[in-house]
Image: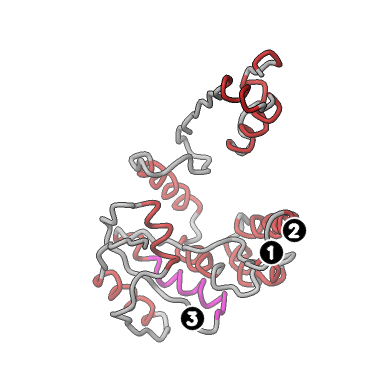
Amino acid sequence: RLRWDAPSAPGVAARAGELLAAAGFDVDVERTRGWDHGVFIPMKVMVPDADIPLAQLSLRNDLDPAAHIAMGRALAPLRDEGVLIVGSGMSFHNMHVRGPRATEPADTWDAGLTAAVTDPDPERRAARLADWESLPLARFAHPREEHLLPLMVALGAGGDDPAVLLATANKIVEQMRGMPELRAPRTSADLVRPEVTIKPHMDLAADLGVTTQALSQTIRIATLGDIDQNSAKFSLSDR
């Protein structure tokens, strides 16, 4: 069984409750439930030693996206108090479709969502996210929106000042340099991407009858197409 025995952060939870209550939200405290899978799965990957105190917040029962954006705005002061606010969820969460059937509609949905979250106008960006159901194939991507709503909280907590957002992003990227568990985050900041050298066992491949084309295709899949096929320097004589 998977375990992630990180300590709780009751002080952070209390402070979050104060901020939410001051913004007009009803707040209650749950002291017995363990970490939700939406917490311990990503955190176990990011911080496998579980040496970071953490407080988890639930979603509202009404699943109101605008209210969750407002919650994020209420929690924004935590950022200046040394608290990292993580919106843990999934951009696509339809468990009824798999494989090729999901690819094209998921890409369509992802394009619409990306355009909304990268809208340079803060008010329009928040409005587009609050109206997420109007995006193409929204309910195909999220039959229920529990896995999307954490994004709304993160958006609200992120603030609206572009200079502050950029400075914060650069600071996070710099801190990420010291996390050996983290691999090649997708970011425009100056973070060196690791290089992986793939050396196929040609003798074994020949014994198994594996073709050069199959080897090249496997490397392209394994690297998500981020390398040039020719850089593998295969030739037909290498079969």
Q: Amino acid at mark 1?
A: Val
Q: Mark 2 and mark 1 in contact? Answer it, CB < 8 Å.
A: yes
Q: Position of residue 172 (x, y in %)?
A: 40, 47
Image position of 76 with respect to 236: above or below: below
Q: Quadrant of residue 148?
A: bottom right
Instruction: Name which residue lies at 50% across and 29% down.
Output: 196
Image position of 148 with respect to 32: above or below: above
Give the number of the disc on residue 97: 1
Observer-nearest of 199 and 237: 237
Q: Residues within 10 Å of mark 2 (few under 14, many from 20)?
A: few
Residue 73 in magenta?
A: yes
Q: CA distance from mark 1 to mark 3?
A: 27 Å
Q: Quadrant of residue 90?
A: bottom right
On the image, numbered disc 2 is attached to which residue? 101
Instruction: Name which residue lies at 45% across and 48% down.
Output: 169
Determine whether, in the image, residue 167 is placed left or right of residue 31. Answer: right
Magenta residues? 63-76
Q: Amino acid at mark 2?
A: Arg
- Residue at the far front in the pictured view: 207
Q: CA distance from mark 3 to mark 2?
A: 32 Å
Q: Secondary structure at mark 1?
A: loop
If the image is split into quadrants, where does the C terminus sit?
top right
Observer-nearest of 51 and 68: 51
Q: CA distance from mark 2 to mark 1?
A: 6 Å
Instruction: Name which residue lies at 30% across and 58% down.
Output: 82
Instruction: Work out whether mark 1 precedes mark 3 in sequence or the reverse, and give the earlier one.
Output: 3
Q: How is the image coloured?
A: secondary structure
On the image, numbered disc 3 is attached to which residue? 60
